[in-house]
Image: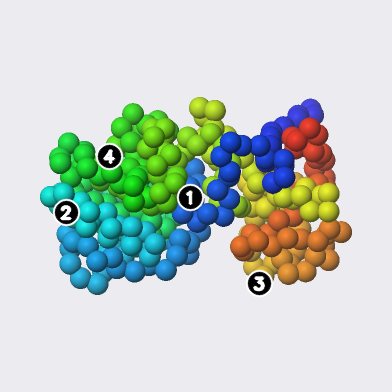
Amino acid sequence: MKKQLSVILGALLSFSVQVSAYQCPVNNVYHVLVNHENSIEPDFVAGEVVMPDVLFATKGDIQKNYMEKTAAKALEDMFNDALEEGVHLIAISGYRDYERQEVLYEQAVASYGIEQKGSAKAGQSEHQTGLAMDIGYLSQSFGDTREGIWLAERCHEYGFTIRYQQGKEHITRYIYEPWHVRYVGVELATRLFEEDKVLEELEYCCPPLQNQAMRVYCDGKYQYKPQVLIFNDVEYLSVREISGLLGIDLSYKNGQIIAQYNNKTIMFNTKESDFFNNTLINIDGYTYVPVNEFLSNFQVNSQFINNALHIFV
Ligand SMILES: [Zn+2]
């Protein structure tokens, strides 16, 4: 039986046809979307991490007292201004690398079971970016304290947003965390505050980082939104995205990408494009392949029609 799978790509086909009241923050590292739907690479950090000069719950030169340096400066300003108003903020936990998050996740699952909602899987925690800080104490009652209220009302002035809001649990898929702030820059933080939105709800519905988000919250639900590049009139998708979409098995060995599907294996080198008639594109460590040509190797016919990728399987 012939089945048709359509992937609507909408206005994302090319940067030049994007129409949005708000410019897509493509490649703004401070807008990176990290959640249960969008993982980051194990070595991803938003920038150099430093120790902000603020009051910490646990003193010392330890990993969780670090933060990305622009976010760290904003945190210092926020803590200083708060103190001048008699509000005593305490930093609990900031940067956390992939390995540390792996340990914390395993501990949380061991204690509370697989359904626990307090700890993210490695690669899915904002703390890995260096842009998040837990402040005050880790209880929802913190939101009712003088410090918690000040933070909720004022943190956007310094570029932070309360990431996991009350009433937005169905979108963020996190419990309300009045203690967890995330740096996104003053402009976006102010917009989120004024429009009462969380990062997932931004109406432009595009991946915050080029090549990065595969699923975004859009029109009230999670949608697959691949980033399509057009080069010499040929549509490209990252090999990871197109493989994820079709269930093509991907592995990497000795610099070769090995893709297996329909009992067929193709191998190609990301540095050379001998395998393809069209050249391959490498951006930030991601390999983009010409979609139609890539799929035809697996006897999968595909075609872009009216901004939609139609795959015939
Ligand atoms: Zn946190």
Give the label, 1 or 2, closer to the camera: 2
- The residue under label 4 is 153
23 and 14: which one is in front?
Answer: 23
The amino acid pointed to by label 4 is Glu
Give the label, 3 or 2, closer to the camera: 2
- The residue under label 3 is 254
Q: For residue 215, say whether it is visible.
A: yes
168 to 209, vertically: above or below = above
Q: In the rendering, which numbered label is found on residue 31?
A: 1
134 and 72: which one is in front?
Answer: 72
**Could you tell me how far apart the alpha carbons at marks 1 and 2 are, in whole angstroms?**
29 Å
**Could you tell me how far apart the alpha carbons at marks 4 and 1 are, in whole angstroms?**
20 Å
Q: In the rendering, which numbered label is found on residue 206?
A: none
Question: Where does residue 291 sit, x and y in percent of width and height?
Answer: 77, 48
Q: Can you tell which quarter of the image residue 166 is in?
A: top left
- Residue farthest left in this picture: 86
Q: In the rendering, which numbered label is found on residue 84?
A: 2
